[in-house]
Amino acid sequence: MLRIYNTLDREKQRFVPIRPGEVRMYVCGMTVYDFCHLGHARVMVVFDMVRRWLRTSGYRVRYVRNITDIDDKIIRRAAEAGESIDMLTTRFIRFMDEDATVLGVEKPEDEPRATRYIGQMIELIERLQERGLAYAATDGDVNFSVRKFNGYGRLSGKSVDELRSGERVGIDATKTDPLDFVLWKRSKPGEPSWSSPWGEGRPGWHIECSAMSCALLGSHFDIHGGGQDLQFPHHENEIAQSEGASGEKFVNYWMHNGFVRVDDEKMSKSLGNFFTLRDVLAKYDPEIVRFFILRAHYRSPLNYSDSHLDDAKAALTRLYTALSACGAGCETEHSQPHAERFRQAMDDDFGTPDAIAVLFELANEINRGRSGLSGQLRELGAVLGLLQRDAGDFLRGGTGPSDALIDELIVRRTNARKSKNFEEADRIRLELDKLGVILEDGATGTGWRRR
C-alpha cells in the first residue's frame, strides 16, 4: 500500500484517493522568462516519476502542471529584450518543452497558462470578497485578509503571530495587516492589464494556481506538489484562498521536493554557482542527469557537483553494461523477490534510492550469469524512465533518445498536424533531427530511423 509523506501533517500517510482508481495531481510549474535551471529539472523529473509509479500501481492519473506566463519578472525581461510578453513566454515555453523531452519527462495531461484563466481568478476573488476574506486597498489592489482565515500557517508550521514578526513580511501601509497578500494588482502605466470589477489590473501570483487547479481538478483533489521553496508563502496562500472560497478542504496530500545545492551551498546567481539545465546537459548525457536526480530521495537535498555527476555516470554505465551482456536470443527470466523489493521501495513514499538499489541487485545477478534478468532490469528501469536505450549506444557514448521517447514525440507531431498546428509539427521534426532521428512520412503513417 502506497504511503506518502504529507507535508501538511508532517508524517507518512496511507494514500487513499478521493475517487477510487483515480488520482488528480497538480504541480506548480515554471515562470517562463529564462532557461530552466537544476531546481526546475528536479521538479519535472520527480513528479514525472510520481506519475509513472501511480500509473504502474493501476491508477488513472490526471496530472496538471501550470505555466506562469505573466508576472513582474516576465514584464521586466520582455521590456529589456524589446519584445512582446507573448513572444518571450512562447520562446521559453518551447525551450522548457525541449529540456523536459531530453530528460524523458512526459507531458502532463493539462498545462494551463495563467493568462488564459483570468476570468476564473476574478470569480475566485469575488467569492473571497463576498465571504469577507478579501478587501480593496487604497492603492487599487485587492488583498487577502490573512487573520480572517482560521488555520493560516498550518502548512509552514508557524502561527500568524510568528509569521508577523518574521523577516519575510514587509511593511505596506495600504494593507490592513503586513501578512495580507495581493490577489489582484492595479496595473502600472504600460503594463499588460485586464478589466475587472476593481479596475484595470492583473492577478497576483498566488491566485493563479488556486484558480487553475480548481478549474481543472475540482475544489478538492488528491495531491499538490512543488519545490520546498514554495511551501511558504505560495502554498500556504493557495490553501487560504481555495478553502476560503469553497469552504471545503483543498488538497489531501502535499508533496515537496528538497532544495538543489551546489557543492553544499545554496544555488545562487550572486554566489556564481548558478547553472541552467542546458549548462549541465552540455557536459552530461540527459539520462545521467535524470539518474542523478532520482538516485536521491525526492525530499532530501540534492547536492550538485561534477564529481557527483561523474559518479552517476559510472553507476548508470554499470547498469547498461549488465544489459549489454544479453543478446537478442536470451530467454526472459523474472525474479519475484526483486520485483517485490522494488514495489516496497516505491510504495514507501516513492523511495527511488532503494528502488535503484534493486536495479543494481539485478545487474549483479546478470553479471554472475543470469542474463535472462536483463528484461526485468529494463522493465523496472522503465518505471523510473531509465534504461530504455540501446546498451551499446549508451556505452559508446551515444546520446540518442530512447525508442519510447521517439514514439511519444511522433504521436505529438501527428496530433499537431491533425489540428493544423504545422508550426508545432515542424518544431518537433526539427527537434528529432537535432537528436539524430530521421522521420519518414508515408501512406500508412510516420516511420523513423537513427542517423
Image (cartoon, grey):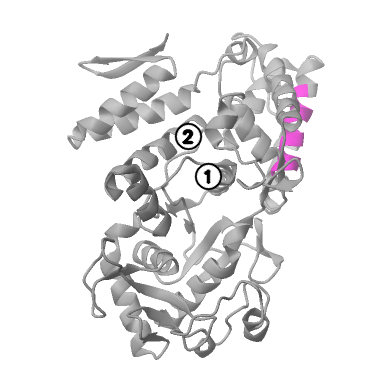
How many discs mark residues in the rendered view?
2
> Residue 16: percent from the left, percent from the top?
58, 64
Q: Is residue 72 visible?
A: yes
Q: Amino acid at mark 1?
A: Met
Is 170 a magenta residue?
A: no
- Quarter of the picture containing the N terminus is bottom right
Q: Is residue 365 left or right of residue 87?
A: right
Q: Is residue 330 visible?
A: no
> Residue 189: percent from the left, percent from the top?
26, 65
Is 353 a magenta residue?
A: yes
Q: Residue furthest right?
A: 368
Residue 407 vertical placement versus 161 (above, below): above
- Name the one closer to the observer, 47 or 278: 278
- Name the one closer to the observer, 63 or 30: 30
Question: Taken as a whole, is the magenta stretch helix, strand or loop?
Answer: helix
Residue 279 vertical placement versus 144 (above, below): above
Residue underneath mark 2: 99
Mark identifier at residue 106:
none
Q: Residue at x 57, y 15 (%)?
A: 390
Give SS at disc 2. Answer: helix
Residue underneath mark 1: 44
- Callout 1: 10 Å neighbours few (<14), some, many (20+)? many
Give yes or no for contact between labels 1 and 2 (Cβ–Cβ under 8 Å).
Answer: yes
Q: Is residue 349 left or right of residue 432?
A: right
- Magenta part of the chain: 352-363
Give the mark toward the camera: 1 or 2. Answer: 2
Q: What distance separates the C-alpha of mark 1 from that of mark 2?
A: 10 Å
Give SS at disc 1. Answer: helix
Q: Residue at x 39, y 41 (%)?
A: 92
- Callout 2: 10 Å neighbours few (<14), some, many (20+)? many
> Residue 114: percent from the left, percent from the top?
34, 58
